Amino acid sequence: MSPVRGRVLWLVGLLTVWGTVSAFAQLPVDPYFEFLNGRRLEKAGELGAALQAFERAAVAAPEAAGIRAEIARFQLDQNKPREAVASARAALALDDSNVGAHRVLGLLLGGSEERMQEAVGHLERVLETPAGGTDVALQSTLGRLYLFTGAVPKAIDLLGRLLEDQPYLLPARVTLAQAMAAAGRHDDAIAVLEPAARADPRLTASLALIYEGAGRLRDAADAYGRAAAASPNNRQAQLRHASALLVVPGASPLKQALNVLARLLVLDSKDAGALYLQSQAYRQTGDMFAAERSARAILATEPDSVAGAYALSLVLGQSRRFKDVVDYLEPFVASAAARGQSATDLLTYLSVAYQALGRHNEAIDALKRAKSAARDGTPALDARLVQAHVGAKRYAEAVSLAEAAQKRYPDELQFIYLQARALFQGGKSSQALSLLETVVGSHPDDLESYLTLAELYGESGRLDDGLRLLDRAAQQFPDNVAVPFRRGFILAEANRDADAEEAFRGVLNRQPNNGPALNYLGYMLADRGSRLDEAIELITRALSSDKDNPSYLDSLGWAFFKRGDLTEAEKHLTRAADALPLNSVVQDHYGDLLAKAGRYRDAVDAWIKALNGDSDEIDSSVVEQKIRDTRGKIR
């Protein structure tokens, strides 16, 4: 064959092949073939080619919702959430009942707080189908979303059924326990999670949270301890353990917390989180020097630390150094604001310091600044602002603020109590009592409404009405010692000492270390000068768990004064008077001690403070007479 003829035959063959290819190119794409080819390529790991196949199928069958749902599923698996959502929505635009598209949207939108409710709707559509009934991941996710969106009964029902078939599904077990705890079923929640946590230490932190909600603080601390032991190098686990120990009553947990924190600080002496907790722990032990040292160690490393400033302020406040609190915090919060730092907690505590110093208008101003820093405010801030106005005896403003807050937070009954207290203090007792009577009638399950109304009945001279109301409360809340304590309080205020003593002893029979009951009973005995040794023993027990409480110190000093032990009396009354400069009763007691010790000029100064104080529970004419009598003895 000649070269020319060979080249001609080659060209003819090439043209024939090209024609065949062109003919195939003009044939319609088979969407089913491309769909199956996409799945084959995906399994083979050729992901780019797989997506191209799925897209060709979608172009070839524009009305096929299932293909777009499959693309959404593929994009979800490839961690392309934005594209997956768009594809799933496109599928539902074609067929609102497409299960695959609902599943993708439910799983993806559930990660967004704003879209959780929409996610629930999509997953519920899938759950109604046979596929949804066997989809473990979907049911687990839906249960979690039910919990987060407040549909707690649905979460408990769905996850309970799921765990019957899948008992080892730990995330679902944790969510079920959380849902039960949210429903107030703490014992059931603990029963669900406890066995699993024993087998898997990773669950102990979740169990600890449920223990905390149930008030089982010791168990919570132990659980956090097991979690920390399982992760000895996990700083956060150690801090959680120490933090939990700080709320467990007793000296031993405090010692444990300090040991945990000491180990962390060996690793990093500038660990601000550990230093903060260490300062809190030392405060609880009463070691103010060590507490202040830890707080200042934070500030030495981080001078702008809000946490450090707060820790230091708490130490100063507990030491009753409120002027130091003001002098430190005012410039700090100003510089924090300039830096754009949130100083809401600091401003709130600044207001506490101002109130302790009797500087009520400045206390109110600090709280207004705190509200401004918090932007929309909080119920707690609004409540403090109302209380500050009551403390400043600006009762009409307090009433207006409480009314406004009640409208903003209609479920917060505390604002009704505050409004009633402000009305009562402002001389509108009948209006205050009527307001509280309405609350008791409409909220028979709210203990505080009974207690507040009973107290105001007592203060308005309607003691029998108050006692009858507390009888009703005792029937409805038989296990709550606040009821007999309030009975003792209003009986003592009415000078029915024997009945008051019986009520306080009832509290102590149930809670032998109840500090307020120990103190009140001890003070009552001391004030009437009877059984002084017992009074001292009772108040000393109260101080054993709250050794810097100035009210308890005043009670103990007064008991020693009544017994004639002026040395011990001065030790305690001096501390109480320094801590409570505006408490008229405390200053009056201190003045009596000083006069008895022959320190007449100092006694007069103390009585003048009593007259200029809160004026609660003192007879001003009696104090004025003591001043006149004692001034004649000053040389």
Image (tube, grey):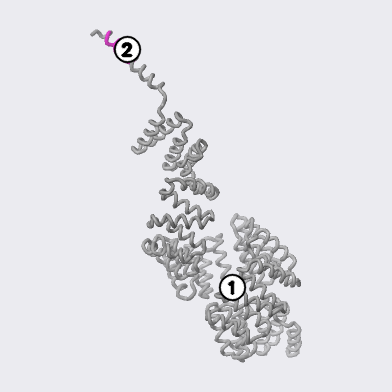
Residue named by callout 1:
476
The reply to whether the magenta stretch includes residue 175 is no
| Amino acid type, residue under disc 1 in the picture | Gln
Label of residue 12 in the image: 2
Left or right position of 566 against 613: left
The reply to whether the magenta stretch includes residue 6 is yes
Vertical side of 350 occupied by 513: above or below: below
Q: Position of residue 330 (x, y in %)?
A: 64, 63
Main SS, magenta region, reads helix
| Amino acid type, residue under disc 2 in the picture | Val
Numbered disc in front, either 1 or 2: 1
Q: Residue at position x 56%, y 70% from top?
A: 315
The magenta segment is 5-14
- In the image, 88 versus 260, the foreground residue is 88
Q: Position of residue 185 (x, y in %)?
A: 49, 64
Circle 1 crowding by C-alpha within 10 Å: few under 14, some 14–19, many from 20? some
Q: Secondary structure at mark 2?
A: helix
Q: Is residue 387 visible?
A: no
- In the image, 15 versus 412, the foreground residue is 412
Question: Toward which corner of the image does residue 303 lie, by quadrant?
Answer: bottom right
Label of residue 39 in the image: none
Left or right position of 309 against 197: right
